[in-house]
Amino acid sequence: MELTDHRRNRWAQNVHGQFYVDQRCLYCDLCRTLAPTIFKRNEEREFSYVGRQPKTDKEVTQTYKAAFYCPQEAIHDDGLEFDWDAIPPDDCHNAT
Ligand code: SF4
């Protein structure tokens, strides 16, 4: 399987699962407004990430809405297609 950049460039802080945020995030706060139980923020480095995968239909809808309106197209929903443990995030972007 060929990896696309957004998979490698995901934030290491995303919890494993269907949805994840990549490093194009601008920290605009929109996703956290639309899906506050799903998206969390790293205040120190100023980015958003998936802190919890959606469980309810309402949360799934909110998360898709956040992905649709994200100005950077930084939210992805293909996280179930591969093994996260086998695909490490790009360390140079995830260094703390
Ligand atoms: S909506 Fe997109 S750009 Fe804005 S904080 Fe969320 S992931 Fe980042």
Image (tube, grey):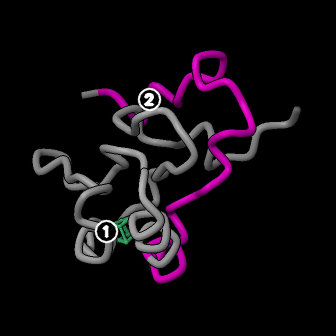
Q: Which residue does the image show at 24% across and 28% down from the upper left?
A: 96
Tell me: residue 45, above or below residue 68. Answer: above
Magenta residues span 66-95
Residue closest to the far top: 86
Q: Position of residue 26 (x, y in %)?
A: 33, 67
Q: Earlier in the sequence, mark 2 or mark 1?
A: 1
Say if the magenta span includes residue 8. no
Q: Residues within 10 Å of mark 2 (few under 14, many from 20)?
A: few
- Would the CB of label 2 be found within 8 Å of ligand 1? no
Q: Position of residue 42 (x, y in %)?
A: 19, 47
Identify which amino acid the numbered label 2 is placed on: Cys
Say if the magenta span includes residue 77. yes
Q: Which residue does the image show at 50% across and 42% down from the upper left?
A: 10
Residue 48 sits in quarter = bottom left
Q: How many marks?
A: 2
Tell me: residue 45, above or below residue 17. Answer: below
Q: Secondary structure at mark 1?
A: loop
Q: Position of residue 64 (x, y in %)?
A: 52, 71
Tell me: residue 53, above or below residue 34. Answer: above
- Would the CB of label 1 be found within 8 Å of ligand 1? no
Spatial CA span between label 2 and label 1: 28 Å
Question: Splitting the image into four quadrants, where does ligand 1 fall?
Answer: bottom left
Frontmost residue, 81 versus 44: 81
Frontmost residue, 80 versus 48: 80
Looking at the rendering, in which quadrant would you find the N terminus? top right
Residue 63 sits in quarter = bottom left
Q: Which residue does the image show at 62% across and 43% down from the upper left?
A: 79
Residue 92 image label? 2
Residue 73 image label? none
Q: Which residue does the image show at 43% across and 51% down from the upper left?
A: 55
Identify which amino acid the numbered label 1 is placed on: Ala
Which residue matches tag 1?
A: 35
